């Protein structure tokens, strides 16, 4: 760990504070620094956009700090700093309205950050507009989205903590959506597609709610999403859905309910794999990854990944489960070289 002269660094930081919007929008320059924070949270009055955040963590005593933002997004995993030392970390965050699910409430304007961890200590902070950030857009359902309240969490809500400065997650997943409804709702695909820029990644995981979608329609909808991403110069990535926690008597997962085969006999993961192969689209086989993990943990051990203990829910993940599954996505992004190695963190 690096040691810092905090007094000097803080003086330089606060004396060179930057504004994210023209001065007239606030009646004068507004530094984006520590003065916008309390002991447990920070609020920055900035317009929608993408921002780089640099934090200086630590204090006179040993500390351990995590950072979440907006609608419970995990932005920085818990980070320890020994007594008297400072640790610098950075991340990039997407600020938008609505700040969580696209069909949900607008949320609080600006950027909101919350400090957590066993002994949080924020020594300094800088927020500046991101100049060259790459976006990872998420198109998905409730197992992916920024869930508004405990104990729920989507894996997309936990993914940002695994990425470093220069890569931002724009989570446009929405509860209850199928490929049919996502394409039809103007708050969803028609809102996401114009925001895609050349080089952006768009991860697509839609299947859980396609319970009455026939195979021809499901395939066509996936192809439409892939084509729409490419039309904007983005890079589509198809993601098979996380499994549901439904076991057979022999300890394996149920072939239909757990592995996302709908009432019409449509094997969603198989169709996704087929579309990915036919159109040369990178594939993250999250069904296979989560199946292997859940079966390895067994009936009892896998309960903690889902909300079985809290809600008898075998579909939606806990914060712990969403974090583990986000880690699987992180691993695949790195393995497929979709995100540069230097911008993928260990979490």
Image: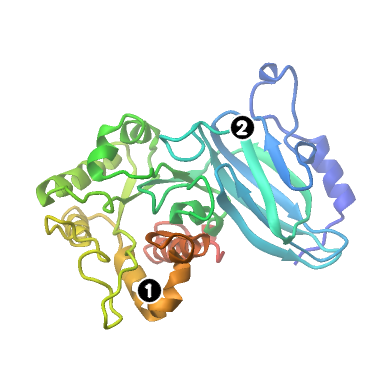
Residue at image position (52%, 60%) is 319
Q: Which residue is mark 2?
A: 110
Q: Which residue is mark 1?
A: 294
Q: Could you say which quadrant of the image residue 12 lies in?
A: top right
Name the N-terminal-most of marks 2 and 1. Answer: 2
Q: Could you say which quadrant of the image residue 188 lies in?
A: top left
Q: For the residue labelled by badge 1, is the local secondary structure a helix, a strand or a loop?
A: helix
Q: Nearer the viewer, residue 317 or 225?
A: 317
Q: Cα distance, mark 2 to mark 1?
A: 39 Å
Residue at image position (61%, 50%) is 68
Q: Position of residue 98 (x, y in %)?
A: 49, 33
Q: Give the side of residue 240 with respect to residue 153, left or right.
A: left
Q: How many marks?
A: 2
Label 1 crowding class (10 Å Cα cut-off): few <14, some 14-19, many 20+?
many
Residue at image position (38%, 79%) is 298
Q: Position of residue 187 (x, y in %)?
A: 36, 31
Q: Give the side of residue 152 with respect to residue 44, left or right.
A: left
Q: Nearer the viewer, residue 160 or 182?
A: 182
> Can residue 188 be seen from the camera position used here?
yes
């Amino acid at each position: 760990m690096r040691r810092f002269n905090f007094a000097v660094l803080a003086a330089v930081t606060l004396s060179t504070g930057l504004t994210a919007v023209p001065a007239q929008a606030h009646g004068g320059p507004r530094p984006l620094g520590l003065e916008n924070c309390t002991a447990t949270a920070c609020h920055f009055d900035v317009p929608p956009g993408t921002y780089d955040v640099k934090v200086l963590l630590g204090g006179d005593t040993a500390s351990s700090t995590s950072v979440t933002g907006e609608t419970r997004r995990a932005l920085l995993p818990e980070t320890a700093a020994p007594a008297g030392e400072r640790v610098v970390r950075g991340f990039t965050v997407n600020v938008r309205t609505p700040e969580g699910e696209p069909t949900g409430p607008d949320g609080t304007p600006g950027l909101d950050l919350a400090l957590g961890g066993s002994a949080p200590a924020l020594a300094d902070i800088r927020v500046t507009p991101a100049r060259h950030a790459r976006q990872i857009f998420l198109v998905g359902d409730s197992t992916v989205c920024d869930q508004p309240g405990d104990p729920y969490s989507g894996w997309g809500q936990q993914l940002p903590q695994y990425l470093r400065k220069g890569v931002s997650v724009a989570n446009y997943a929405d509860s209850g959506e199928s490929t049919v409804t996502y394409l039809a709702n103007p708050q969803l695909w028609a809102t996401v597609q114009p925001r895609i820029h050349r080089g952006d990644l768009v991860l697509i995981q839609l299947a859980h709610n396609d319970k009455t979608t026939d195979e021809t329609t499901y395939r066509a909808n996936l192809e439409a999403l892939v084509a729409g991403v490419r039309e904007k110069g983005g890079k589509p990535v198809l993601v098979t859905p996380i499994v549901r926690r439904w076991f057979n008597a022999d300890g394996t997962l149920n072939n239909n309910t757990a592995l996302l085969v709908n009432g019409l006999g449509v094997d969603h993961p198989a169709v996704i794999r087929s579309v990915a192969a036919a159109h040369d689209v990178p594939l993250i086989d999250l069904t296979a990854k989560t199946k292997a993990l859940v079966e390895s943990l067994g009936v009892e051990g896998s309960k903690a990944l889902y909300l079985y203990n809290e809600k008898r829910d075998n579909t939606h993940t806990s914060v712990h489960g969403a974090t583990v599954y986000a880690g699987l996505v992180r691993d695949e992004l790195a393995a497929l070289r979709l995100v540069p190695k230097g911008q993928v963190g260990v979490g």
